[in-house]
Amino acid sequence: MKVEAFDALYAPTSPMIQIEQGYGRWLDYRGMDEVEKRATEIAGRSYDHLPELVHILKQQQRQFGELSERLSANLDLLEQREAYVMVTGQQVGVYGGPLFAVYKLLAVIKRAKEAEAKLGKPVLPIFWMATEDHDFAEINHVFTTQTFSRTLKKDALSTLPLAGKASVGELEFDRVKLELVQMAQRMLLNETETPHTLRLYQELIELIQGSHSFAQFFGGMMRRFVGNDFLLFDPHARDIRALERPMFRRLIEQHDALQQALEHAFEDGMPSVELNKEAAHLFYHDGTRELLTKIDSVYTTKRGHRFTETELLNEIEAHPERFSNNVVSRPLMQDYLFPTLGYVAGPGEIAYWLQLRPLFHEIGWKMPLLLPRLGGLIVSSNDEKKLRQECVTLEEYMKHPLPDHPFDDESFEAKLYAYRTLTEAVSQEARSHGRRFESKSRHVLERLADEMRAEAKRDQYRLNARRIQLSTRLFPMNAPQERILSMVPMLNRHGLDIFERMKHAYEQSEAEQCLFKV
C-alpha cells in the first residue's frame, strides 16, 4: 500500500481544520510539540480510582477479543501511574459506522506511539465508545450502492423499544441480529464478488452472533479488522458510573460557575457551533434519558423530575448509575477518569471543544492536547484507470466531480426524423385499407421507436457507468468517502487486512490528510 499527502481530500466547503494554525489562542497546548508540558501537568494530579478503573478496563476487553501482550503489560503500568492515555471516540455505528470512525482510531494509535517516544513512558490509545448517547438514528444504518445510480440507498434497522429515548447501551441488540444478517447480505450482494467476500460474510455473521450489545458489535469489528493494540472503553456500565460519582457531584456543586464560564466562552473567530448553555450538562436516567436543567435553583427534566441541589447530590451518591454525561461534560469526565494527554477529534468536535477551555480552568485543570483526526481517501488501481480514461486527475475530480453525460432528447428526436416520416407514410397507406390497419401500424411503429429510445438510453447508461462508479467510490452522494461508506465495502474490495495495512502505512506518513492507494 502506498500513502501520500492529499490536500484535495476535502471539497472546498468542508476543509479539515488546521488546529495549531488557526485556533492556537484558544488552546492550552499547541500540538504534539507540547506533549511533555501536558504530561508534567497531569503528573501532579491525583487519580486514586485508577486501580479500579484498570480492573474494569481489563474486564471490558474480554468481550472484544485478546489484547497484545505489550498493551496488557502497559495496562498494569497505567494502574501504577507509570503510563498515560491518548483518547478518541465516536458513536457505535453498525458495521463500524462511517469510515472516519476507523480513521479516528488509526490516528489515536499513531499519536499514542509518538507521545510514548517523546516521554519514554507507555501511552495507551483508548477509543471511548459513545454508548451513553441516545441518538439511535446515528448508528442504525449503512449505505449501499444501487445499479446505475449515483444515489446510495440508506439501509436502516427497524426501531427498537425506547430507541431515541434511552441510551444506546440500554437497547436490546439481540432483537436486531436477524436484521443485521440480512443487512450484511444486501451490502455484499450490491458489491462485486471478490476472493474476500465469502470469508468476510462468515466473519461478520460470527461477530453478530457473538455480540449482545451495539458496543460489543462495534468493538468486535474494530478488534477483528483493525488490531489488538488499542483499548475499547464502554462508559455505559454501572461500575464506571460509580467511579464517576465524585465528578458528577463536582459538576453540580460548581454548576453556576461552569455555566458562567460557558456563557462567555465563544469568541469571534471560533467556528460556529450550537451548545446548550442552559443545561446542567448531565442526563438523568429513569427508563429514558433526560437532560437536567437548573431553573430557579431546582434541577428539572422535561418529564417532570425535580430535584433541589441537596436532593440531586443525594441521588448521585445513592444511584450514580442513573446519571450520564452530555457533550459538554464528557470531555471533563474523560479528563477526570484518565491521565489524558490528548484527544483526537473530527472537525465538528474541534469546533465545540474550543469553547470548553474555560470549563477546564474552572475545574482547576488545563485542557488536553486537541489533535485532528486522520482524513483518508482509499483509491484503487481500477479507480485510477477510470480517472485516466476520463482524462482527469484525482485532485481535479475531488474538487469538481464529473456529472453524468445527459441524454439529449432533442438530438435523438432529430435522428428519428426520417423514421417519423416513414411512420406517417406507412400509416397513410394502411389507412387506405381501413382505420384499424392505420391504428395497428402506428402502434407497432411507435413501440419500435420506444425500443430504439430505450436502447439509446442503455447506451447512455453504459457511457455513464464509469462516472457513476467513480462517484459512488470516491465522492458518494457528493460527500467525502469517509462520511458515507462503511468498513464492509473496503474489506470486500481490498482484503480483510486493509485497515491494518492502512495503520502501518499511516504511521510512516507525516500527513494528516492521506491518500491510500491499494
Image: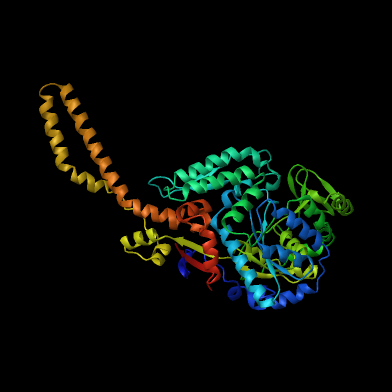
For residue 411, side relative to residue 216 (left or right): left
Would residue 125 be visible to someone looking at this image?
no
Residue at the location (49% across, 64% down)? 10
Residue 24 sits in quarter: bottom right
The number of callouts visible is 0
Would residue 358 be visible to someone looking at this image?
yes
Q: Position of residue 54 (x, y in %)?
A: 76, 60
The front one of 186 and 9 is 186
For residue 317, side relative to residue 408 (left or right): right
Which residue appears farthest toward the front when viewing the image? 69
Q: Position of residue 448 (x, y in %)?
A: 21, 35
The front one of 411 and 289 is 289
Q: Position of residue 155 (x, y in %)?
A: 52, 43
The front one of 171 and 110 is 110
Residue at the location (37% across, 66% down)? 393
Q: Position of residue 12 (x, y in %)?
A: 47, 65
Residue 230 sits in quarter: bottom right
Q: How is the image coloured?
A: rainbow
On-image quarter of the C terminus: bottom left
Check the image and report above or below for 435 versus 210.
above
Residue at the location (25% across, 37% down)? 451
